[in-house]
Amino acid sequence: MVRPGWSDNNKTILNETKTKAILASGKWLDKRLGQVKLNATEHEQVNSQKLLGVKIDCKLSFDEHIDDLCRKLSPNISGSLC
């Protein structure tokens, strides 16, 4: 999937235990990647992942992120926003 040595060529260090694969696709397209290997290590493909505090999903929707925020905030807010 990715060129061998990508992380070395781009002077980055991958944390093999945290690295996951996500395929961003359209609303109506449901696809899975085959094996995803970086530096000879196979990585899990996920449907959503938290990145810099924002949960993104394979449909590029923020629904899961908003649901998580509502779950965290609802006990602290009188009245219902979510």
Image (cartoon, rainbow, N blue to C red):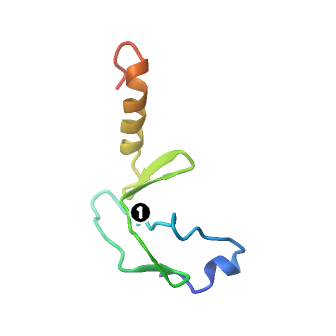
Name the residue beneath numbered marker 1.
24
Farthest right residue? 11
Residue 69 place in picture, x, y as percent? 43, 34
Residue 55 place in picture, x, y as percent? 45, 48
Farthest front residue? 17
Residue 46 place in picture, x, y as percent? 38, 62
Residue 26 place in picture, x, y as percent? 35, 60
| Mark 1 surroundings within 10 Å by alpha-carbon count, few (fewer than 14), some (14 through 19), many (20 or more) | some
Farthest top residue? 78
Is residue 53 placed above or below 23 in the rendered structure? above
Quarter of the image holding residue 22?
A: bottom left
Quarter of the image holding residue 33?
A: bottom left
Quarter of the figure that contains the C terminus: top left
Residue at x 38%, y 30% (from the top left corner): 70
Residue at x 54%, y 45% (from the top left corner): 53
SS state under label 1? loop
Amino acid type shown at disc 1: Ala
User: Of residues 65 and 29, which is closer to you in this image?
Assistant: 65
Asked if residue 40 lies left or right of residue 60, the reply is right
Is residue 73 placed above or below 4 in the rendered structure? above
Number of numbered discs on residues: 1
Residue at x 42%, y 30% (from the top left corner): 72
